[in-house]
Amino acid sequence: MQGLAQALAPVPQEHGHGGPSIMERFKRMAPPSFKGESQPLLAESWMREVVKIFHTIRCAEEDKGSPATYML
């Protein structure tokens, strides 16, 4: 669960590189929505899937807050 807290830290998203934003790349990967599950295994499974997406789109630690929050 500590990883979830770190993933949700608010951070800026603008990089000025002209390509798609982190949020756009994240959404293209069809991330799962978190449905407020009270079962720890389901919450951890959601978190693992989101972390996989971050890895796939090469999302920097400081850019993970907005996309993860969007899915909550």
Image: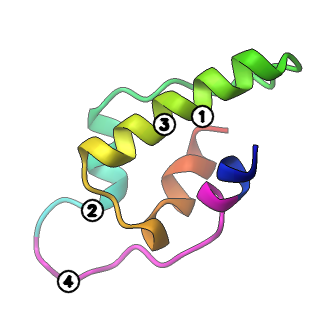
* Numbered disc 2: secondary structure: loop
* Numbered disc 4: secondary structure: loop
Residue 32, percent from left and from top:
51, 24
Local crowd at mark 1 within 10 Å, few (<14), some, or many (≥20)?
Answer: some
Going from the N terminus, do you reach mark 4 or mark 2 first?
4
Residue located beneath label 3 in the image: 50
* Numbered disc 1: secondary structure: helix
Residue visible at 36% across and 66% down in the picture: 60
Q: CA distance from mark 2 to mark 3?
A: 17 Å
Residue located beneath label 2 in the image: 21
Going from the N terminus, do you reach mark 2 or mark 1 first?
2
**What span is colored magenta in the figure?**
6-18
Q: CA distance from mark 2 to mark 1?
A: 21 Å
> In the picture provided, is 21 more to the left or to the right than 34?
left
> In the picture provided, is 16 more to the left or to the right than 14?
left
Going from the N terminus, do you reach mark 2 or mark 3 first?
2
* Relative to 62, residue 5 above or below: above
Amino acid carrying label 2: it is Ser
Amino acid carrying label 1: it is Met
| Mark 3–mark 1 CB contact (< 8 Å) | yes
Residue located beneath label 4 in the image: 16
13 magenta-colored? yes
* Relative to 61, residue 25 above or below: above
Q: CA distance from mark 1 to mark 4?
A: 28 Å
